[in-house]
Every structure is written in C-alpha cells, then in structure tokens.
Image (cartoon, rainbow, N blue to C red):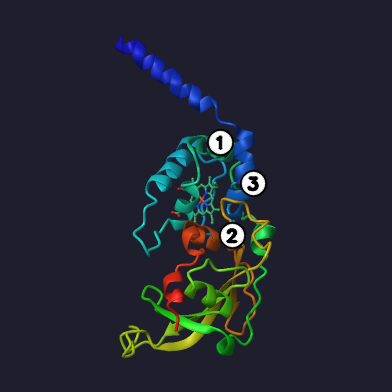
C-alpha cells in the first residue's frame, strides 16, 4: 500500500512537470523577464544572472524562494526587491512555464550581453529646468552605505495632490539631487546640526515623472501606472544605458502609494 501511494504521488508530480507550456513561458520571458535577463536568457548587465540553459528545477526553486521571502519590513527595500516584486506575481504554472523556456535556451557565450529592450531604454522624462524655483523641496535622506545625501523635490501637481490625499496625477514630476557627503579625516560623512550629511559634490539627479499614455508600452507585471524614470548627470544630460525596468520593478509594490517611497513626506510638505 505504501508503495502504491508513493507511486501515485510520483505520477502526479511527473504530470505537473509535463504540463509546462514553453510557448506561454516564452511570451512572459520575452516581454517581462527579457527586460533584465534578455529574451534568450543572456542578461543585460553584470548585476543580473544569465538564465539560458539553467536547470528548470533550479529556476523554479529560486522563483519560489523570492516569492515566499518577499516580506521586507515596511519602509525598507530587500536586497532581492526587484525579483521579489516579480515573483509574487507568478503562480505555480507561470513558474514552471518560464523555467522550462529558459532551460531550453542555448547556454550563453562567455561575456555575451543582451541589449536593453527599446521600451525600457527609452524614457519620456526630460530634465525639469527651473526646478529650484518652481518645485517644493520636501525631504532629505542620508544613504550611509554609499555616503550620499539626497534632496527630494516635487512639482506643484504632485504636492497639491499629495496634500489633498489624492493619488499623484499624470503631470507629476519628482526629482532628487544626489550628493556625495562631505567626509571627515576618517572618511566618515560629516553630519550637520539637523542630522543630515553635509552635501559636498553633486553627483547626479534621479527623476520620475508621469504622463498620459507613458505606461502603455510597459507590460503589466512591471508597469507603474504612467510613471517613467530617468537619471541625469550633474550637467543635466540624460544618462545613457539606464534600464527603466530596474526602477519599475523596485517601485512596483508601491501601487497603493502612487508608486513612490516618500508619499507621506510629500503629503506633509510645507
Ligand atoms: C528588473 C530586472 C529583472 C526582471 C524584469 C526580472 N529579473 Fe530575475 N533577477 C534580477 C536580478 C537583479 C537578479 C539577481 C538576484 C537577486 O536579486 O538576488 C535576478 C535573479 C533571478 C533568478 C535567480 C538566478 C540565479 O542564478 O540564482 C531567477 C531564476 C530569475 N531572476 C528569474 C526571472 C524571471 C523568470 C523573470 C520574469 C518573469 C525575471 N527574473 C525578471 C532582475 C530581474
């Protein structure tokens, strides 16, 4: 009897494994996963693993682990935030299907890299000239790990909506100035009386802005309503090679707070 039971469990597992639908896996892989892992599983950057020819069982196990572990404390970002945000949206079938698809791709040549997908490489966000006068500065954050301090600015559309408790409308623009902190003789950031690092050199700007239709070419699993993202150099030029998928995945779990980490501070802006 025990043997029979064991056999039937084995058959059930085998049947589930057989049900993997590679075509369905391909559709998801080439529109969503491809933004980071490449359509054929050859990733777009050194920070992202290749999935081509990886074992299906391993891919499935990792996806389940991302999904089960996706409970970062409020206000924090887990080290696997991007994958957690994606894996929580996958059901068991999706996982089996994409795993089967990537497992069936030929292994990557050493050093090979995929190009960014056009819809994630292209952003509609332009540099908001005149923001210092026109925008509201509403928040500051120290980043200890990178020894940086960031100042947060928002345009009137965004501030007005946040103060009124409404979702941020299309036309909202948020900008941060990213500064290297001033360092003391021990290479530690110097803090001012307010506890914030003293800003030294301007390194870059990050921006997110939303406009009607701007999210239409982003697949639902990564879409942040109509938000687009951009990074600008200190001399206000759009930084090339930015993958919006990184930002979209990171902000994806924030759908209840207009996709921004600082809605509370924005709603309290003076
Ligand atoms: C926004 C970029 C991004 C997207 C989109 C994305 N991934 Fe990932 N993925 C990553 C990063 C970064 C890692 C590195 C691991 C980490 O976060 O711990 C990773 C890791 C993984 C791993 C673990 C690989 C290993 O060697 O351990 C698997 C499996 C995986 N992703 C599957 C997927 C699948 C399937 C999709 C589509 C449904 C997907 N990913 C979409 C960025 C992404």
The residue wearing badge 1 is 97
Rendered residue at 51%/64% (across/down): 258
Q: In whole angstroms, how far apart are the C-alphas of marks 2 and 1?
A: 27 Å
Of pointers 2 and 1, the one earlier in the residue sequence? 1
Q: Nearer the viewer, residue 41 or 83?
A: 83
Of pointers 1 and 3, the one earlier in the residue sequence? 3
Q: Quadrant of the N terminus?
A: top left
The relative height of residue 199 versus residue 28 in the rendered view (above or below) is below
Discs 3/2, front: 2
Q: Position of residue 136 (x, y in %)?
A: 51, 84
Rendered residue at 62%/67% (across/down): 241
Taking 45 as reference, is 63 left or right? left
Residue 39 in sight? no
Discs 2/1, front: 2
Q: In whole angstroms, how far apart are the C-alphas of marks 1 and 3?
A: 12 Å
Rendered residue at 36%/57% (across/down): 72
The relative height of residue 125 versus residue 15 in the rendered view (above or below) is below
Residue 171 in sight? yes
Callout 3: SS: helix
Q: Position of residue 178 (x, y in %)?
A: 49, 80
Q: Are marks 1 and 3 in contact (CB under 8 Å)?
A: no
Q: Nearer the viewer, residue 131 or 7?
A: 131
The residue wearing badge 3 is 30
The residue wearing badge 2 is 225
Q: Would you say the beta carbon of the disc 1 residue lies within 8 angstroms of ligand 1?
A: no
Q: Quadrant of the C terminus?
A: bottom left
Callout 2: SS: loop
């Amino acid at each position: 009897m025990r043997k029979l039971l064991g056999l039937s469990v084995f058959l059930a597992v085998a049947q589930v494994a057989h049900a993997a639908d590679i075509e369905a896996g391909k559709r998801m892989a080439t529109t969503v996963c491809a933004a980071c892992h490449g359509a054929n599983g050859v990733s777009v950057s050194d920070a992202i693993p290749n999935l081509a020819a990886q074992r299906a069982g391993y891919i499935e196990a990792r996806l389940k682990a991302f999904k089960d572990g996706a409970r970062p404390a409020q206000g924090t970002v887990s080290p696997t935030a991007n994958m957690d945000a994606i894996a929580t949206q996958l059901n068991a079938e999706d996982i089996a299907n994409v795993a089967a698809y990537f497992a069936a791709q030929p292994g990557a040549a050493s050093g090979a890299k995929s190009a960014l997908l056009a819809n994630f490489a292209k952003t509609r966000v332009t540099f908001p000239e005149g923001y210092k006068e026109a925008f509201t500065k509403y928040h500051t954050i120290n980043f200890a790990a990178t020894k940086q301090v960031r100042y947060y600015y928002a345009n009137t559309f965004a501030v007005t909506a946040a103060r009124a408790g409404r979702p941020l409308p299309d036309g909202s623009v948020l900008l941060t100035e990213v500064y290297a902190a001033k360092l003391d003789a021990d290479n530690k950031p110097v803090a001012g009386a307010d506890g914030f690092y003293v800003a030294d050199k301007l390194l870059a700007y990050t921006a997110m802005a939303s406009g009607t239709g701007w999210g239409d070419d982003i697949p639902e699993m990564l879409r942040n309503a109509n938000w687009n993202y951009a990074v600008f150099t200190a001399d206000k030029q759009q930084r090339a090679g930015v993958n919006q998928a990184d930002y979209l995945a990171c902000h994806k779990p924030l759908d209840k707070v207009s996709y921004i980490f600082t809605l509370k501070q924005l709603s309290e802006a003076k």
